[in-house]
């Protein structure tokens, strides 16, 4: 237990601290928690988070406070996240942050499986073309995988929230009660930065819809969760209201980039006096070996930190935790049977019939690929018409094609691979409406992530046509 003099806060160098304590062999054995001028330094005989078991069924079921157990803290205590606040009748808002490979997809899979087992209606937008959580197909009520599909889902969720609000007002209800007669809902968007970042094609509408869902959904049983790779305000719609909405919900911080901590403090998501110990990519430190060691290159024994996080809005925000082991340890050629087993048997919870009319045609067509494709095309046409009416189109005499078609044409006309900047130049020379680099990057990423059927990544920021 450490305490700094009044007027000072504790700061430390983790490497220097481990050196002083004589535990350079494995810095993960030393855990530091700070709160201004106070700190707790814990030294373990072995890394307490190196190996995590899978969850049990009891972990996945809500307790009397509406919480599920998502993993363990370094001291062995259960780490919990709230799915519903039974005291206030409030659905939850949440934000999961982490770099690529930090474990966001497995965290999402576990939350979706918990929602199914607790009969929560899950609407899940997977903006990685369905690759973030492929096992969720058929395990949730609605699973769009395109930006247009997610816009339709958000429109429907807002409409359901507003319809519930009108019904509850007529009944004199000011809070949500599970199953009376409505079901608890969760609206979740993976890779949300692709939808909300500067230059994204539906950024303005998506920001407005998420904000509205945050305003009206909480008291009528409709929660909202965003998973993203960045925390900067401009990557989340550029909206102070949206930031405030996320700030008041649960925040899960997985492994972060070098600039993310400063952004968290600047955006008010973490007090400046709190110091979080960085989460390394691997728990096992790289040993110092001679260049002439013949066996050094053969040592591939490592322990990654996937799923390690801080629950910033929990009672222990600086206590490192790790999520349960979700799914198989090694990559599989198809769906993961361990993840499928988490979802359990049976159909997922469905939206109550009384809300179907509010959810509209998109909800009715969610399992009809042809009907959904037509609705998504209508969303694209709405966007193009709005741009044209606003004077954005460079050449009104030319027919405006879908951005996917324009990118395909640009890649077809050129030999070899192109960078996103070169694709942008080619697209903006075709006579259609002017687009920005962010839109090109989003669309290239979406096409490349869709199993490489149209566009393939052939190098860093290099793309080519696959068919």
Image (cartoon, helix red, strand yellow):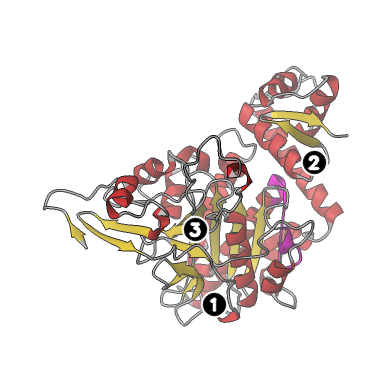
Of marks 2 and 3, the one in the foreground = 3
Q: CA distance from mark 1 to mark 2?
A: 37 Å
Q: Which residue is mark 3?
A: 308
Q: Percent position (x, y) of residue 402? A: 78, 34
Residue 59 numbered mark, or none: 1
Q: Which residue is mark 2?
A: 452
Q: Which quadrant would residue 59 be assigned to in this image?
A: bottom right
Q: Residue at x 80, y 61 (%)?
A: 367
In the rendered structure, does residue 273 fall within the stretch colored magenta?
A: no
Q: Residue furthest right?
A: 467
Looking at the image, do the residues carrying marks 1 and 3 touch, with CB atoms under 8 Å apart?
A: no
The answer to which of 56 and 466 lies nearer the viewer is: 56
Q: Is residue 362 visible?
A: yes
The answer to whether residue 203 is left or right of residue 147 is left
Name above or below for residue 42 compared with residue 438: below
Q: Earlier in the sequence, mark 1 or mark 3?
A: 1
Q: Percent position (x, y) of residue 427? A: 74, 23
Q: Residue at x 56, y 40 (%)?
A: 293
Residue 285 numbered mark, or none: none
Q: Percent position (x, y) of residue 18? A: 33, 51
Which element type, helix, strand or loop, lies under badge 1?
Answer: helix
Of marks 1 and 3, the one in the foreground = 3
The answer to which of 412 and 121 lies nearer the viewer is: 412
Looking at the image, do the residues carrying marks 1 and 2 touch, with CB atoms under 8 Å apart?
A: no
Name above or below for residue 44 compared with residue 170: above
Which element type, helix, strand or loop, lies under badge 3?
Answer: strand
Q: Residue at x 85, y 24 (%)?
A: 412
Q: CA distance from mark 1 to mark 3?
A: 18 Å
The span shown in magenta is 134-149
Determine the main secondary structure of the stretch shown in magenta: loop
């Amino acid at each position: 237990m450490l305490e700094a003099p009044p007027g000072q806060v504790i700061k430390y160098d983790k490497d220097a601290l481990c050196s002083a304590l004589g535990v350079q062999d494995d810095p993960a054995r030393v855990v530091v928690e700070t709160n201004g001028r106070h700190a707790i330094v814990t030294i373990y005989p072995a890394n307490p988070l190196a190996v995590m078991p899978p969850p049990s069924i009891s972990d996945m079921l809500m307790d009397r406070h509406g919480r599920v157990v998502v993993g363990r803290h370094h001291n062995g205590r259960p780490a919990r996240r709230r799915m519903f606040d039974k005291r206030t009748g409030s659905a939850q808002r949440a934000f999961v942050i982490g770099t690529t490979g930090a474990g966001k997809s497995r965290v999402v899979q576990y939350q979706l499986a918990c929602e199914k087992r607790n009969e929560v209606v899950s609407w899940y937008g997977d903006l990685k073309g369905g690759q973030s959580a492929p096992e969720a197909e058929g395990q949730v009520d609605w699973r769009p995988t395109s930006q247009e599909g997610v816009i339709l889902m958000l429109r429907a969720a807002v409409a359901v929230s507003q319809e519930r609000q009108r019904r509850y007002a007529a009944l004199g209800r000011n809070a949500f009660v599970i199953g009376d007669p409505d079901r608890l809902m969760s609206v979740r968007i993976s890779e949300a930065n692709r939808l909300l970042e500067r230059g994204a094609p539906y950024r303005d509408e998506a920001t407005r819809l998420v904000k509205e869902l945050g305003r009206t959904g909480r008291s009528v049983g409709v929660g909202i969760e965003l998973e993203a790779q960045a925390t900067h305000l401009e990557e989340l719609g550029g909206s102070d209201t949206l930031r405030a909405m996320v700030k008041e919900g649960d925040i899960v911080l997985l492994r972060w980039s070098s600039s993310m901590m400063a952004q968290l403090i600047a955006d008010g998501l973490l007090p400046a006096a709190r110091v979080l110990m960085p989460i390394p990519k691997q728990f096992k430190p790289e040993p110092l070996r001679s260049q002439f060691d013949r066996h050094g290159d053969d040592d591939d024994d490592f322990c990654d930190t996937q799923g390690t996080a801080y629950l910033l809005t929990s009672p222990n925000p600086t206590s490192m935790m790790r999520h349960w082991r979700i799914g198989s340890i090694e990559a599989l050629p198809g769906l993961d049977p361990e993840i499928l087993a988490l979802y359990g048997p049976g159909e997922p919870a469905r939206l109550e019939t009384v809300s179907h009319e509010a959810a509209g045609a998109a909800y009715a067509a969610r399992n009809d690929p042809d009907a959904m494709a037509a609705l998504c095309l209508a969303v694209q046409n709405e966007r193009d018409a709005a741009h044209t009416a606003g004077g954005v189109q460079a050449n009104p005499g030319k027919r405006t094609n879908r951005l996917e078609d324009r990118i395909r044409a640009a890649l077809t006309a050129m030999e070899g691979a192109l960078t996103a900047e070169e694709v942008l130049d080619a697209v903006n020379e075709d006579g259609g409406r002017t687009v920005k680099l962010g839109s090109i990057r989003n669309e290239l990423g979406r096409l490349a992530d869709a199993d490489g059927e149209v566009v393939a990544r052939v190098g860093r920021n290099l793309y080519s046509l696959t068919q």
